[in-house]
Image: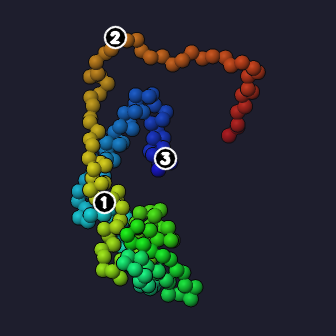
Amino acid sequence: MCEGFNSVLVDSRSKPIISMLEDIRVYIMKRWVANRTKMTSYQGSIYPKVFNRFQKESWLTRYWLPRWSREKLFEVKHVSQFGQQFIVNVDNMDCTCRKWEISDIPCTDAITAMKFLNINAEEYIGHWFRKSTYEETYNTIINPINGQHVWDVTPYSDILPPKKRTMLGRPKKKRRLED
């Protein structure tokens, strides 16, 4: 995420601090509006990328066999000859493959167990992947501000950069690479 944000600010970094901060503010303001409008037009209750991943996991359940132990505790085994096997506890929302705990999206094993119990597995997707949480995140508004020519002039003197000091010790040799 940092690399992506830094790549947007390549041109802004060479500007004075106020211009750079203004570019950042405008970029974030545009991006938040785009994200907000994108999610208001979306019909589902789960973020689209997460929902696509969930559907892929759900499609893979046909290769798994649930073995019911008690209430919502299962042993889920893969149908291949290697026979991977995991324990799923639907109440505790955990699986021994640990994918569910790490991503907070039910893994294939957990979805297999939930299908056996006729439980809607979408309800077990973490709340931060929901449309309501996404809308709440981008609900705050970055207020527009006037240009610098409209700003009030302060009675304080301009802030100057710190004075250049000579460092102790022998100065480093200035080498320049030739192109």
- Within 10 Å of disc 2 (Cα), the crowding (few <14, some 14-19, many 20+) is few
- Per the image, the residue denoted by label 2 is 155
Please indicate, yes or no, whether residue 13 appears anywhere in the rendered image.
Answer: yes
Q: Secondary structure at mark 3?
A: helix
- Per the image, the residue denoted by label 1 is 130
> Looking at the rendered structure, which numbered label has been put on residue 117?
none
Whichever of callouts 1 and 2 sits on the residue coming sooner in the sequence is 1
Cα distance between the residues tagged 1 and 2: 49 Å
Residue beneath the point at 67% across and 17% down? 166
Q: What is the quadrant of residue 44 in the picture?
A: bottom left
Whichever of callouts 1 and 3 sits on the residue coming sooner in the sequence is 3
Three-letter residue code for mark 3: Cys
Three-letter residue code for mark 1: Arg
User: Can you say whether 90 is above or below 40 in the image?
Assistant: below
User: Can you say whether 97 is above or below 67 in the image?
Assistant: above
Q: Secondary structure at mark 1?
A: loop
Residue 13 location, x and y as percent? Answer: 48, 35
Disc 1 + disc 2, Cβ < 8 Å = no
Horizontal side of 161 relative to 178 (left or right) equals left
